[in-house]
């Protein structure tokens, strides 16, 4: 074993990346840009092409990838895919070598990591959850917020890799394994509650005859402001409900948050209602509709569009 302790014996870890979607592709590109040797895999073969142009090697399967890397990152839709890839029939986790690290950066739940950590302990394989916030824009710029859950020494070992994808000031060790998933689910739950609440308030004010830009400025300057009012509502004013994050993933996240409350015996009445509102938007507009489509739902119910300028006469 090398002094650094990586199975490949190199000074810097060889990084494997599985899940090259809207988030995973730019994140993996930043890992390559930071000078790490990179191996990639996705069920959609075409997703690997731009990374090959950046010097990445393509693995033929998830376990094939796992067998050659020091740090394996997954960025998959949710728990079902994470479990299938890491613990399913062709189990990638089993293929990881002694002292390798698996980092799941998907928004998911601790179950698969718990099983893997028990299984990996005799081989010294570490398991970390490190979900992210910051959208495709942050993934592309390498400025993501990262919430790492796991053993402090394990998180420290992989910090250079996490810093390649996130803003080092906001790559935070938030607690033991599972804590990263919990922080991320709390963040998304609050964000989507805020988003829907702001939509109702803006539509109410607009219907009462207040110009939307004026209303937004007044609310954003007051004690009830939110990131949505300060920043993200701009797209909606142009009819863009933000398809960089889609309702299939939103309802997945809200479902996981409400399930966590159920598991822990925490009553989440408002959260349950908000989850159903996003499920209704998904039924109306489809899986791939943008995350702010509940704003559209409120607009349509009131017969008004949130657009800047005086309301049409
Ligand atoms: P996505 O659907 O764009 O990408 C998922 C990728 O995983 C796809 O390329 C798909 O082909 C691949 N995949 C699915 N099953 C696979 C398998 N069995 N083996 C190999 N590859 C497989 O999703 P995304 O928007 O990139 O989100 C990924 C994760 O990040 C999700 O957990 C999401 O909740 C979270 N997230 C997304 C955003 C965002 O703005 N999109 C922001 C923060 C966190």
Image (cartoon, helix red, strand yellow):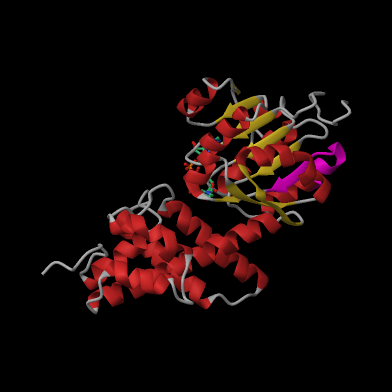
Q: Nearer the viewer, residue 194 or 7?
A: 194
Task: Determine if residue 26 is in view.
Answer: yes
Residue 73 at x, y = what percent? 65, 38
Q: Quadrant of the C terminus?
A: bottom left
Residue found at the far bottom of this picture: 208
Residue sitting at x 43%, y 52%: 248
Vertical arrangement, residue 313 with respect to residue 133, above or below: below
Q: Is residue 248 magenta?
A: no
Residue found at the far left of this picture: 313
Residue 178 at x, y = what percent? 70, 56
> Which region of the structure is painted magenta?
118-129
Vertical arrangement, residue 118 with respect to residue 305, above or below: above
Q: How many marks?
A: 0
- Left or right of 155 on screen, residue 53: left
- Left or right of 10 on screen, residue 283: left
Q: Quadrant of the N terminus?
A: top right
Residue sitting at x 70%, y 53%: 172
Q: Nearer the viewer, residue 164 or 278?
A: 164
Residue 305 at x, y = what percent? 24, 64
């Amino acid at each position: 074993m090398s002094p650094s302790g990586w199975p490949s014996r190199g000074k810097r870890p060889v990084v494997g990346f599985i899940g090259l979607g809207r988030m995973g592709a730019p994140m993996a590109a930043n890992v390559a840009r930071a000078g790490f040797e990179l191996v990639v895999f996705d069920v959609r073969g075409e997703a690997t092409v731009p990374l090959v142009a950046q010097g990445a090697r393509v693995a033929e399967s998830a376990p094939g990838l796992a067998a050659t890397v020091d740090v394996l990152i997954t960025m998959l839709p949710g728990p079902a895919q994470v479990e299938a890839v890491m613990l399913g029939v062709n189990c990638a986790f089993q293929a990881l070598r002694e002292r390798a690290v698996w980092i799941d950066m998907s928004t998911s739940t601790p179950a698969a990591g718990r099983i893997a950590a028990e299984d990996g302990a005799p081989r010294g394989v570490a398991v970390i959850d490190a979900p992210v916030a910051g959208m495709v824009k942050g993934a592309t710029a390498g400025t993501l917020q990262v919430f790492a859950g796991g053993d402090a020494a394990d998180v420290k070992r992989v910090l250079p890799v996490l810093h390649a994808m996130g803003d080092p000031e906001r790559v935070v060790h938030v607690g033991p394994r599972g804590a990263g998933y919990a922080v991320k689910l709390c963040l998304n739950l609050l964000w989507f509650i805020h988003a829907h609440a702001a939509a109702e308030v803006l539509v109410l004010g607009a219907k009462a005859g207040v110009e939307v830009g004026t209303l937004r400025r007044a609310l954003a300057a007051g004690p009830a402001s939110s990131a949505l009012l300060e920043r993200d509502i701009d797209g909606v004013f142009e009819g863009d409900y933000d398809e960089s994050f889609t309702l299939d993933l939103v309802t997945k996240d809200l479902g996981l948050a409400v399930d966590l409350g159920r598991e822990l015996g925490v009553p989440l009445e408002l959260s349950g209602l908000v989850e159903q509102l996003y499920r209704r938007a998904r039924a109306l507009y489809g899986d791939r509709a943008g995350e702010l489509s509940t704003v559209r739902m409120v607009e349509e119910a009131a017969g008004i569009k949130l657009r800047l300028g005086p309301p049409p006469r």
